[in-house]
Image (tube, grey):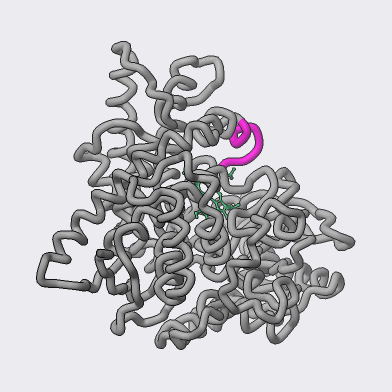
Amino acid sequence: MDASTIASIIISVISVFILSFTIKLAKKFWLRPKKVEKRLREIGFKGNSYRFFYGDAKEMEQMRIRVLSKPIDLSSDDIASRVLPYHHYLAQKYGKQFFIWIGTKPRLTVMDPVLVKEILARPDEFQKPRNDHMAHVMVGGLFTTEGNIWSKHKKIINPTFHMDKIKKMVPLIVKSSLDMMDKWNMLLSASKKSVEIDLWEDIQPLTYDIMCKTLVVGETNEEITRIHELRDQINEQAAKVGKLMFFPGWWNLPTKDLNTLKSVHKQVEGLVKKVVTKRLEEMKRGASSEGDMLGLMLEAYLDKTGGFSLDDVMDECRSFHFAGTEVTARSLIWVLYVLSKYPEWQAKAREEVLQVFGDQNPNAEGLNQLKIVTMILYEVMRLYPPTSMIHRAISKDTKLGDMILPAWVQMTIPITLMNHDPDIWGEDVHEFKPERFEEGVFNSKMQSVYFAFASGPRKCIGQSMAMVTDKFVVATLLQRFSFEISPSYEHAPKHAFLLVPQHGMKLVVRKLI
Ligand code: HEM
């Protein structure tokens, strides 16, 4: 073979390589998005035309920045346009079935409660989005696993959340709340009648303390304290890198913020490992498993027959920080905000608490008598749902209602938007009306529209625990303090994985005589 033949073979190979690479790029960045768009329009979804590479990402980010630049009116509980601004805007423009381009992928927004229920009832087909790196770092564990692994883990963890176990947690919840109040009592020294606090700073350490004491029994040690500090850094970094997420392969971009996020995540994993192995050693030396969540998981690990690895135990422990501590803290913050805003409901709730417990510490026996407090909690989680949206994805063409959705699309269930939709809740949708929940949430009407804890097989495993925690923290606080919104509070609810008050939650606290 002479040199020119070799050269032409090499050129041909390179040309074929370049051509196939170009075709691949064209498919990924143009042909596939346009094909999916056509199918979505055929089945009745509306949305912006696909734009090369970015899709809707730029507009979405610009709108988010604009909306977050100013607070909303204090008198308003209509938060949807601030919390999910782009979804809100497109719903106004296109109606309730629309799609948003996250880079090259369309995300369908489904707001019809019947379809939402169907999606959530079929977790094998409508799964959590794959390769969701952020969900793995922020939560992980049961929250992100699928299929057999999910059912195995759920079976092991489930007993922790039985009502008889949760009721035993009540004294610990009350004790942790009283400990937090010691700080307020110190601030409210004899000379001061009231004090301004930023609830944001006190409530998350409180729920962390509660989750640690109830799910991982034992003394809080250095590692546990450090994990909590690092979680704050993870949240901060995650918010910074969130805007990269539309970029294909974004997780491997060499940015400083991403590297910091990954390194803090590694540190958390290391600390969780220390906590878990310490407890494992104690159990191997004959200590009781205590029947808490960590104990149950380590029993499953030691059993060896179930294939529950030590990595599984650590992943689940890590995930309960986010799922348990952070979500519960967000819910409590908004409950106390709403009680401060509606003093007549604060008074009604306090009256009920005093009727049930008098001046005794709240106890599990009174749990079912807290009717007004329960109604208030459900209504606050309707107006201010801690989890603003839920995502799902399909890997093949899938029937939903009377539509066939094309493979590889993702779906968003925008809980905040649905909870502020007058077609679902009526014309008074933006009003705070706890009486909506007079019959609870387990009646058929509420069950078909109330998704604060999702629904179906993957609904929140911690719902009862969250409700009991919220009820007893609120009861313990209302017995001793009154709350008002501070003049320095700016009403700025913001979606940052969960619903957060953008500028803190400043309340004025007074000691009851
Ligand atoms: C007010 C507080 C809470 C709210 C509003 C809430 C809400 C939710 C929602 C909406 C989901 C479904 C997410 C999805 O499918 O993508 C979920 C799942 C989950 N929640 Fe909660 N949650 C709360 C408290 C808790 C607590 C206290 C725990 C545990 C201690 C917990 C553990 C979990 C777990 C493990 C999952 C995943 C379940 C699965 O996929 O099988 N949550 N939660």
Task: Reply above or below: 223 against 300.
Answer: below
Residue 225 visible in the displayed image: yes
* The magenta stretch spans residue 400: no
Q: Which of the pair 167/117 is nearer the observer?
A: 167
**Secondary structure mostly taken by the magenta-highlighted segment of the chain:** helix
* Residue found farthest to the right: 402
Q: Position of residue 454 (x, y in %)?
A: 63, 54
Position of 340 with respect to 88 (left or right) is left
Image quadrant where residue 364 sits: top left
Quarter of the figure that contains the C terminus: bottom left
Q: Position of residue 211 (x, y in %)?
A: 38, 43
Q: Position of residue 192 (x, y in %)?
A: 14, 72
Position of 247 with respect to 35 (left or right) is left
* The magenta stretch spans residue 146: yes
Residue plotted at (77% across, 51% down): 396
Q: Which stretch is magenta?
A: 145-151
Q: Which of the pair 2/369 is nearer the observer?
A: 369
Position of 404 with respect to 32 (left or right) is right
Image quadrant where residue 150 sits: top right
Residue plotted at (19% across, 57% down): 183
Position of 429 with respect to 387 (left or right) is right
Residue plotted at (70% across, 67% down): 108
Q: Which of the pair 74/124 is nearer the observer?
A: 74
Q: Position of residue 164 (x, y in %)?
A: 51, 32
